[in-house]
Amino acid sequence: MTGPRLPSWLMESVVRIGCGAGFAGDRADASAAVIAELVRFAGPRFLMFETLAERTLALCQIERRRDPALGYSPAIARMLPQALGPCLANGIRIIGNFGGANPRTAGRRIAELARAAGFPDARIAVIEGDDLSETFSAEELRAREVDGMLLSGKAPVVAANAYLGAGPIAQALDAGADVVITGRVADPALVLGPLVHVFGWDWADWHRLAAGTLAGHLLECGAQVTGGYFADPGVKDVPELAEIGYPIAEISPAGTLVITKPRGTGGMVDRRTVTEQILYEVHDPAAYFTPDVTLDIMAVELADDGRDRVCVAGARGHRRPDRLKATVFVESGILGEAEISYAGPNARARARLAADIVTARMRRRAPDLLLRVDAIGRDSTFGALAAESATDAPPPSEVRLRFAAQSARRDEVELLLDEVEALYCAGPAGGCGVRRHFAPRLGSASCLIERERVEPRVAFVGDGA
Amino acid sequence: MTKVDVPLYRLAHARTGDKGNRSNIALICRDPAFYDTIAEQMTAERVAAHLAARQPRKVTRYELPKLAAFNFVLDDVLEGGVNASLGLDGHGKALSFFLLTARVIVDAALLGQMPAAAPELLHELEK
């Protein structure tokens, strides 16, 4: 293959950053193979964990309000006990957004885990300052909302957090942190922070900051770049998906990077898996906004660099945005879902009758409740998009009906679930397998916040934190 | 030159991402040789028409020839997004596979370069 390739003298000075998790629900054992691979190399090595989806953070805020000793990511207990010892023993430094709504308490919890792993002197840094709920009034947030009117309603604000950049992470590493725990930061900052720490890139060196941000973007979803979320049997096959290896990036001081994965693991890294992830959740590819740089991937090129190795070059950067993005959550009622199955001869007609019964009863008893009814297996995913192709479909051997509604009126949502359950005895013949689910709902809005109103802070556990 | 009418699935693969009520679908050529065919036929207007049932407020197409890819950004197609939709797929993750059901007309010779993929699935799509 032709294309970008690292000269050997650069290979010796690469930084290796592995990913141990791409979301809160990710595999607890994913980091083991990544750590085992990083241990084989000298030089600066880091392990990053991304476990803080927007909604996860809002749930953390709710939990913290209930109990000030909680509100950090529950993924700490699942993911860190087994990773801390091997990382601390081998000089692999950890960066993770496990802090949620309570980075300090998370830091203390991790210090306890480190002590239990035999490392009582581990330096645990926590980064705060992303939480805007104390410094911004609801009115101030409302004035800064973009693309929406959610905050103009009366719903109480549950959480408001700004996306911090890589600066405080680099600062914590400069100060000797073995583990850096953040609250809300831009996901790629979990990777850019260590790169700026090692290479000393200037905060106005937009092209290198862009390269580091692209590395972070490719790592932040874990296995989504190593063959996860990719397999389509017979069309896009992925070997040994059951034991997929999570990604490792090798980044040079000039900003060229290679995406690879631990030897002996399943999955694969090729130009197709990398291309899908480069564009994941990107809008304008010439202007992907982060707190540290505006990333431009229009000129990015990929080249095969051996088995399960793809070289990525050509990221360009432009000046960082003037303001920081923040996500604000407001209470938005209760979501209720209930399902029931009909199977065998005439299943479709019995399911339709069941839907009609529930719809008619709800129309009389809760006329304002917006109700959604899906037939799972037919149109529940594509919705109206599937309507045309469904008309001439053969009769199904089973239909699973799903009812869903959302409302601030808890009693109305509960009534819907009760009505679905009542189909057991009072609905069409053969109804079976009722399941019901009930959960608080949070609406989200985006705001743009002046940088001078956000002050990131770094503290060390046992040393002010 | 013989032309054939095939699902886009034969020529490309795709991945969806979401932010709020906005979806992006990355459409990636299985072979760079398909880039021009897809560029010509899968316009923003065509994608908007294919997803008309979701009433996109706006569809923008970005072209990435170096990656043999396109990025479609679809505004207001997620029924409010993952925190508001009553649907099962509030992220719109499956929209990528819906896009791949669009029909494209391609030179038979160009298509012949591709290894045949999962014939029974293709039959399902093509009937």
Image (spheres, coloured by chain):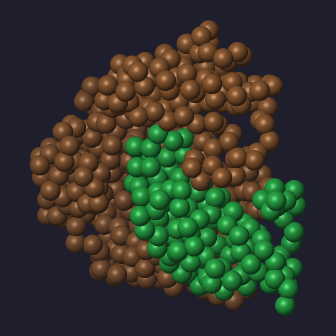
- Does residue A459 appear anywhere in the picture? no
The chain coloured brown in the image: A
Farthest residue, direction top: A425
- Of A119 and A377, nearer the camera is A377
Measured as percent of width and height from the top left, residue A316 is found at: 43, 83
Measured as percent of width and height from the top left, residue A225 is found at: 61, 62
Measured as percent of width and height from the top left, residue A461 is found at: 29, 42
Residue A73 picture quarter: top left
Measured as percent of width and height from the top left, residue A246 is found at: 62, 55
- Of A97 and A369, nearer the camera is A369
Residue drawn at 28 percent across, 36 percent down: A331
- Does residue A182 appear anywhere in the picture? yes
In the shown orientation, is residue A80 left or right of residue A156? right
- Of A172 and A50, nearer the camera is A50
Residue drawn at 47 percent across, 39 percent down: B86
In the shown orientation, is residue B113 left or right of residue A348? right
In the shown orientation, is residue A74 left or right of residue A218? left
Number of marks in picture: 0
The image quadrant where one finds the C terminus of chain A is top left
The image quadrant where one finds the N terminus of chain A is bottom right
Residue drawn at 58 percent across, 27 percent down: A355
The chain coloured green in the image: B
Residue drawn at 12 percent across, 52 percent down: A140
- Of A94 and A362, nearer the camera is A362
